[in-house]
Image (cartoon, rainbow, N blue to C red):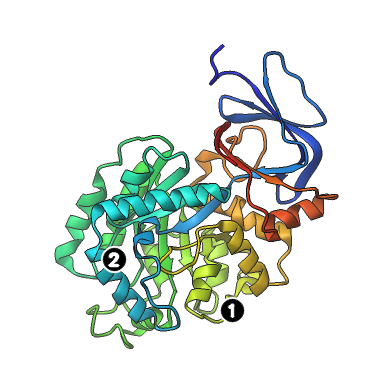
Amino acid sequence: MTRAQQPLVVRARWVACGPERLLEGASLVVRDGRIERVARGRVRIERAREVDLGEAIVAAGMVNAHAHLELGALAGRTPRGGDFAAWVRAVIALRARASRAELVAAARAGASRALATGTTCVLDIDTTSAAARALGRHSIRSVVLREVLDAHDAARTQPALDGVRRPLRAAGRRREGLSPHAPFTVSPELLAGAAAIARARALPVQMHWSETEAEVQWMTSGTGPLAGLLGASPQRSALDLLEAAGLLGPGLSLVHGNVPARGEARRLARRGVTLVHCPGSHAWFERERWDWRGYARAGVEVALGTDSLASNEDLDLRRELRLAAQAQPWLSPEALWRAATVAGARAAGASERLGRLDPGFSADFLVLPARARSASAALEELCLGATPVAAVWVEGRPSLSR
């Protein structure tokens, strides 16, 4: 029997199968990288490798539902505060001066930091192809969302589509997806073409949406600060354009959603769209409190992301959990942990079966040392504690241990 085929039994004081189900004194049975069984007490299987973690919490690896890993090359060099336009100008200028080697190294380092803090899958926006190169052999699981935009310039539409028409070559734990940048930077023609590619290859799609008042104003009326930069406005809402392209559905995740119009939250919920919130980046730009309560009341599935080190201090998703809890003290630990796992997995695509420790799911998990006396205390430690992650396993294999 080869090592890859050898069954594995992992025991711990607490096993968090999901946000609503924590088992005390439980065992995970793993075979060929997937969870075969979860059981209370000790499980013995002939010729299985046994790992007893003792006083620890074993929980599903977190899913960072939105990152720009390559922008780690810009860390410490971009402005903070409310002037978003100044930040965008700085990012464009600094990224243009960064070498490809610097961007690739930043993406690789960012993935390693995410993994070290308990993230086992990251959805990364790849603007320069640096992430595709960096993540192909990395231990972390990734969805490389290849970015396209044309700024409503017809001359750029076809080249943008041609750039993503050929699939990414299969490599390691890397999968591909698409990211038409945002409704205000992508023409209807480019949006339709990207949607066709996504449907043909069953790719997850992610877009920035409703991040600022300026983009909403230009989209719906053609006025405001962007009027002189983007040409003729579609004079339609972003969600209308996404619906017309056939994208408004479960395969789509939208990022930010800071200024939704009346009724848009309910529309997202009805269509099964996942919404991604990045608390650290939100705080970086000193924005008003995000309306998580309104989205929750509408039934929207909210996932968590870090955005980039150009607009955040870290790529630690547990830090994002703590920031979310500080800004939204009404949120339960169950809701927070769901956002960091189940909801992010939904954005990554259902085929991977991530975000839970249940039979049939991938054996991606983190190990957190803790002497929790109850299931609620264990979940609070995951969401609100600052104890460093001790180990991370991906597909039933250790990818990090301290």
Residue 188: which disc? 2
Q: Is residue 398 above or below residue 176?
A: above
Mark 1 and mark 2 lie on one chain; the one further toward the N terminus is 2
Query: Disc 1 marks which residue?
Result: 289
| Amino acid beneath label 2 | Pro
Tell me: residue 93, above or below residue 346. below
Q: Residue at x 31, y 86 (%)?
A: 225
- Extreme residue in the front direction: 402
| 318 vs 137: above or below | below
Residue 248 on image: x %, y %: 45, 60
Is 109 in front, or is 394?
Answer: 109
Q: CA distance from mark 1 to mark 2?
A: 31 Å
- Residue 15 in view (yes/no): no
* Image location (x, y in percent) of residue 144: 38, 49
What is the x, y in percent for residue 18? 69, 47
Q: Residue at x 35, y 69 (%)?
A: 183
Tell me the SS state at disc 2.
helix
Q: Nearer the viewer, mark 1 or mark 2?
A: 1
The one of 31 and 322 positioned closer to us in this rendering? 322
- Circles 1, 2 touching at the beta carbon (< 8 Å): no
Q: Would residue 82 be found to the left or right of residue 154 on screen? A: right
Horizontal and vertical percent position of residue 238: 40, 71
Above or below, 7 against 147 in this view is above
What numbered label is drawn on residue 84? Answer: none
Asked whether residue 86 appears in the rendered view, the answer is: yes
Residue positioned most to the left: 155
Query: Which quadrant, please, contains the N terminus?
Result: top right
Give the crowd class for mark 1: few <14, some 14-19, many >=20 residues within 10 Å. few
- For residue 365, what is the image quadrant? top right
Q: Is residue 224 left or right of residue 5?
A: left
Q: Given the image, on which type of amino acid does mark 1 rest?
A: Arg
Q: Residue at x 57, y 35 (%)?
A: 362
